[in-house]
Image (tube, grey):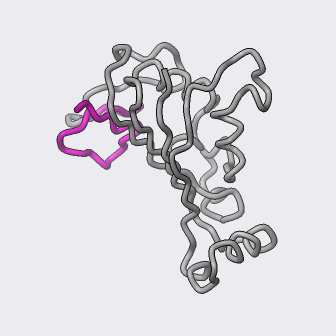
C-alpha cells in the first residue's frame, strides 16, 4: 500500500512517502505544491494525508485535481484544515484560504457549483468538525455547530476523508 504524507514538514511518517516544499534528509520528494504537474506517477497512491496544508496553497481545487491524478481508484484522501471561525485559521499569515464544511462540497461536487463542465472526482466519505476545549462542553453536535456559526473558538479543525472516483 503506497501512502503519501503530502506537506509533511517536520512530521515525517515511517512507511510513508514524505513530500514537502522543504528539503530534508527524510523528505522523499521536495517540490512546490503550486506548480503542476507533480513529479509523482499516475495512479500510485492508496492513501494521501494532507495535515494543515490546503490553507497554504494558491489553488486548492487544482491541487485536488493533481492528487486525483496520482491516486488509485478508491484511494482515501485525508485532509485536515483549520476551521474558518477559529483564530487558528487567521493567526498564520501564510494561510491563503479559509474552510468551512461547505468548502469541501464546493471542491468535490464541481457540477453543483462553479466548474460545470467537470464531473465528480471524489466522494466525501466522512467529515468531522473537531471542537475546541470550549466546544467540547456544548452538546449535542448539532447545537455545537449552530453555536459555532455565531461564536468563534467552538470548532478548531475540519477533518475530511475523500474517496477517489475514477
The quarter holding residue 54 reads top right
Q: At x 78% / y 67%, what residue is drawn?
A: 149
- Is residue 87 rendered to the left or right of residue 27? right
Question: 13 above or below 159?
Answer: above
Asked if residue 103 is among those painted magenta in the image, a careful observer would answer no
The percent coordinates of residue 67 (x first, y second) are: 47, 26
Asked if residue 13 is among those painted magenta in the image, a careful observer would answer yes
The percent coordinates of residue 125 (x first, y second) are: 51, 45
Question: 30 above or below 36?
Answer: below
The quarter holding residue 155 reads bottom right
SS majority, magenta? loop
Q: Residue furthest bottom?
A: 137
Q: Nearer the viewer, residue 164 or 129?
A: 164
Q: At x 54% / y 59%, what residue is drawn?
A: 128
Magenta highlight range? 1-24
The percent coordinates of residue 124 (x first, y second) are: 56, 42
What is the tally of numbered marks visible in this picture?
0
Q: At x 68% / y 75%, what residue is drawn?
A: 144
Question: 159 above or below 150?
Answer: above
- Is residue 53 rendered to the left or right of residue 102? left
Q: At x 32% / y 31%, what residue is drawn?
A: 46
The quarter holding residue 92 reads bottom right
The percent coordinates of residue 153 (x first, y second) are: 66, 73
- Which quadrant does the N terminus fall into? top left
Question: 124 above or below 28?
Answer: below
Amino acid at each position: 500500500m503506497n501512502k503519501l504524507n503530502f506537506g509533511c514538514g517536520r512530521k515525517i511518517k515511517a512507511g510513508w512517502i514524505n513530500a514537502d516544499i522543504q528539503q530534508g534528509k527524510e523528505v522523499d520528494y521536495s517540490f512546490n505544491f503550486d506548480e503542476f504537474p507533480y513529479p509523482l506517477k499516475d495512479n500510485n497512491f492508496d492513501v494521501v494525508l494532507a495535515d494543515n496544508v490546503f490553507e497554504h496553497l494558491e489553488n486548492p481545487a487544482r491541487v485536488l485535481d493533481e492528487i486525483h491524478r496520482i491516486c488509485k481508484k478508491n484511494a482515501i484522501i485525508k485532509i485536515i484544515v483549520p476551521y474558518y471561525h477559529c483564530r487558528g485559521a487567521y493567526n498564520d499569515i501564510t494561510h491563503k484560504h479559509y474552510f468551512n464544511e461547505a468548502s469541501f462540497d464546493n471542491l468535490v461536487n464541481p457540477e453543483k457549483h462553479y466548474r460545470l463542465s467537470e464531473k465528480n472526482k471524489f466522494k466525501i466519505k466522512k467529515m468531522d468538525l473537531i471542537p475546541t476545549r470550549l466546544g467540547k462542553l456544548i452538546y449535542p453536535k448539532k447545537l455545537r455547530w449552530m453555536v459555532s456559526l455565531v461564536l468563534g473558538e467552538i470548532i478548531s479543525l475540519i477533518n475530511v476523508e475523500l474517496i477517489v472516483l475514477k
